[in-house]
Amino acid sequence: MKKLLCFALSFCIFISVLCTTSFAWQPRLVDPYDNFRHEHRLFTEFDEGLESANYLAKVFSAATSGAAGNPVAECDGYLTRVEAISVAAKIHSMYYLDNYVFPETKPWHRSYVDYALKYMITSGDATLNSAVTRGELAHMLYRAFPRQNMPVISYILDGSIRDVYIGHPYAEAIYYFCRAGVFSDLDDKGNFKPEGKVEREELYSIISRIVIPSSRNGIKLNGYVGSTAPMRAAAGDDFFNDACFIGNSLVDGLSYYSGLNTPTYYSTTGMTVLSANYKYEFYSPIGTYETAVGAAAAGDYSKIYIELGINEIGMEVWEFIYYYSRIIDGLQSSLPDADIYILSLTPVNTKRDSGGVFTMANVNAYNEALKLLTIEKGCYYLDCVSTMVDETGFLSNRDTWDGVHFYEHKYLEWEEIIRTHYVD
């Protein structure tokens, strides 16, 4: 019974806030007070109290205001941007301006768009009749609804929504609504799909979950994007069949001395964040001569591991991160579904640390910046320092022949870190 009532309420909310925007199709408008006048008992079944009841009554009363103006073009059943703007403007007016009456204008949507611009619900009215994206809708609703009293029900780390990095223009709204259980339809990999279209029917349930807390759904993400990939049982060789490694001579050593024999390696001595993107020295899976990044992007890889940085020590951290981010951008553009693992710089020994730029202080500074980049880009971070150093915080002399590169047994230890830290 509750599910039926919730759907009915959601449908009414959607129709009422859209009625003044005028679609190509028009619902039959009814006086909501015929059914809901003084019937707060209906709403208290959801344990929301009079506050929600009063709000919903106001929403229903909007259905009597009628529709005016020219209908917007149909958009293959998807919610258009002007419809979303009008919905958000109407909702904002109900909460903040005691159900402000929008004046009739030509075109009909001008008053809604002007209102939305005034209260920063949207930043512009270009391409109004195109389909609104999920990210845009989240942003508009975030600006329209008061944000108090919407508790977190899903503890989602910054950066853990795979395709919404922290620098995304709608990240604040998307993370807020996902944590509150309003947008709970992330896919198995943790993608929100911010550029996806919104079917008109979806708005019923979205607004319902905002207004009715008991209808919200928690989210459980499998991975920990932006932080160290979770520790699991060691992955077998088959896990790495569709993996590739991009890196410097340390990755060369990994390919020679570890048991990771099934991945593809695009690595060479001296590789840097610059040469990985600009030096053509690898054949790609499709037979073209490419850079390391280009060869990886041309393949059908679902996992990409990157180990770069030790050759760049001495470069300004911001510059290192700038070029590293361009590598990730290129890979994500070509292989949007691939999991990208950023391997931290590996430690150095005390002798290397005693002079020049190969210091643990520099290694740690680069790694802290890589952690932030991982969060921003929605990748996975692998800590290759904390379990590889000795009690002094440095690479043991027993593990390295030159203070940077490993003896064979250390490559096996590094292999274990890679095999045991991954996402499903």
Image (spheres, grey):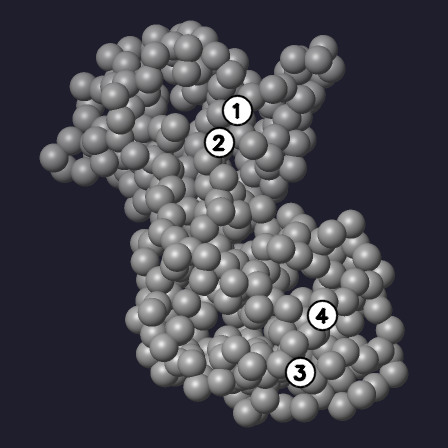
Q: Amino acid at mark 3?
A: Thr
Marks 2 and 1 in Cβ contact (< 8 Å): yes
Image coordinates of residue 61 in percent, x first then y, are 59, 83
Label 1 crowding class (10 Å Cα cut-off): few <14, some 14-19, many 20+? some
Location of residue 151 by image quarter: bottom left
> How far is the residue under mark 3 from the one under mark 1?
53 Å
- Residue at x 60%, y 19% (from the top left corner): 300
Secondary structure of residue under mark 4: loop
Secondary structure of residue under mark 2: strand
Viewer can see residue 85: no
Left of 326 or right of it: where is 103? right
> How far is the residue under mark 3 from the one under mark 2?
51 Å
Q: Which mark is residue 302?
A: 1
- Residue at x 59%, y 60% (from the top left corner): 203
| Residue receiving disc 3 | 64
The N terminus is located in which quarter?
Answer: bottom left
Image coordinates of residue 399 in percent, x first then y, are 23, 20
| Residue receiving disc 2 | 339
Task: Name which of mark 3 and mark 1 comes first in the sequence.
Answer: 3
Q: Nearer the viewer, residue 88 or 272?
A: 88
- Residue at x 45%, y 62% (from the top left corner): 5
Task: Name which of mark 2 and mark 1 comes first in the sequence.
Answer: 1
| Residue receiving disc 4 | 28
Task: Name which of mark 3 and mark 4 comes first in the sequence.
Answer: 4
Q: Amino acid at mark 4?
A: Arg
> How far is the residue under mark 4 from the one under mark 1?
50 Å
Q: Nearer the viewer, residue 16 or 21?
A: 16
Mark 3 or 1: the one toward you = 3
